[in-house]
Amino acid sequence: MSTWPHTDPGRRPRSARPAEQPLSPEDFREAMSHLAGALTVVTTQDALGNRWGFTATSALSVSQTPPLLLVGVGNTSSCLVALLGSEAFTVNVLGEHQREAAESFARKGVDRFEGHDFVPWPADGPPRLVDAHAAYRCRTAGSIPVGDHHLLIGEVTGFAAQPDAGPLLWHRRDFVALSRKETVHA
């Protein structure tokens, strides 16, 4: 896996920017709590067959051609080394009924997979949560170290969905079921 260099030819040099102070970590966390995100469990399998996974809200599409998605992985995550060294990973979008999975995969020092129905995808690939709202199988395409995270980029090679249930969202530090949403008309 390679690290993608990221340069923006249209970017102004830092010296040409007005001096601004970034938000404190606490203020940034509060600000980001207003940005709703789909709860996912990102999973992989290392060369020894060990399964790894963590809860994330930082999955998003990057490109249609080729089909790429991105996931943020904290530099202190117990899964970082396994994900950076893996050839493939799965982004499992949790359904409204999977709050327990979100909580399990956010804990440290426990078997996160215990009590949840995962199967290899395909037969020898990264773990897929059987009843996830949606799942994206990705071939690892690269990573970018940025701040206190690595941005893991995957080329989507498979997709599965359970369209009957809505996704489980994270908003304002709480679980939100999309089926309870209220339609807003302009």
Image: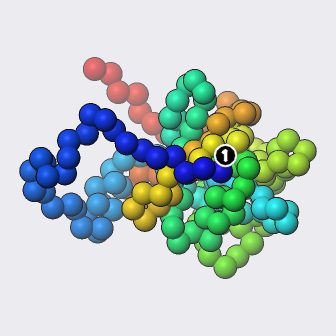
Residue 70 vertical position relative to residue 100 in the rendered view, above or below? above
Along the viewing direction, whichever of 118 and 3 lies nearer the viewer: 3
Hey, which residue is sitting farthest top in the picture? 186
Hey, which residue is sitting farthest bottom in the picture? 109
Coloring basis for residues: rainbow
Percent coordinates x, y for residue 64 in the rendering: 55, 25
The local crowd at label 1, few if under 14, some if 14 to 19, many if 20 or more residues have their Cα within 10 Å, is many
Q: Which residue is drawn at the image coordinates 33% and 38% (left, top)?
A: 8
Percent coordinates x, y for residue 138 in the rendering: 69, 41
Percent coordinates x, y for residue 91 in the rendering: 65, 46
Residue 44 vertical position relative to residue 166 in the rendered view, above or below? below
On the question of residue 37 being in view, the answer is yes
Report the amino acid beneath label 1.
Thr
Q: Which residue is drawn at the image coordinates 14% and 52% (left, top)?
A: 15
Along the viewing direction, whichever of 63 and 6 lies nearer the viewer: 6
Secondary structure under tag 1 reads strand
Total count of labels: 1
Residue 43 vertical position relative to residue 106 in the rendered view, above or below? above
Residue 20 vertical position relative to residue 24 in the rendered view, above or below? above
* Residue 43 picture quarter: bottom right
Which residue is label 1 attached to? 140
On the question of residue 175 being in view, the answer is no
Q: Is residue 29 left or right of residue 104?
A: left
Percent coordinates x, y for residue 37 in the rendering: 46, 46
Along the viewing direction, whichever of 59 and 168 lies nearer the viewer: 59
Q: Which residue is drawn at the image coordinates 61% and 64% (left, top)?
A: 80
Hey, which residue is sitting farthest left in the picture? 18
Q: Is residue 168 left or right of residue 160?
A: left
Q: Is residue 8 left or right of residue 151?
A: left
Q: Which residue is drawn at the image coordinates 62% and 71% (left, top)?
A: 78
Q: Quadrant of the C terminus?
A: top left
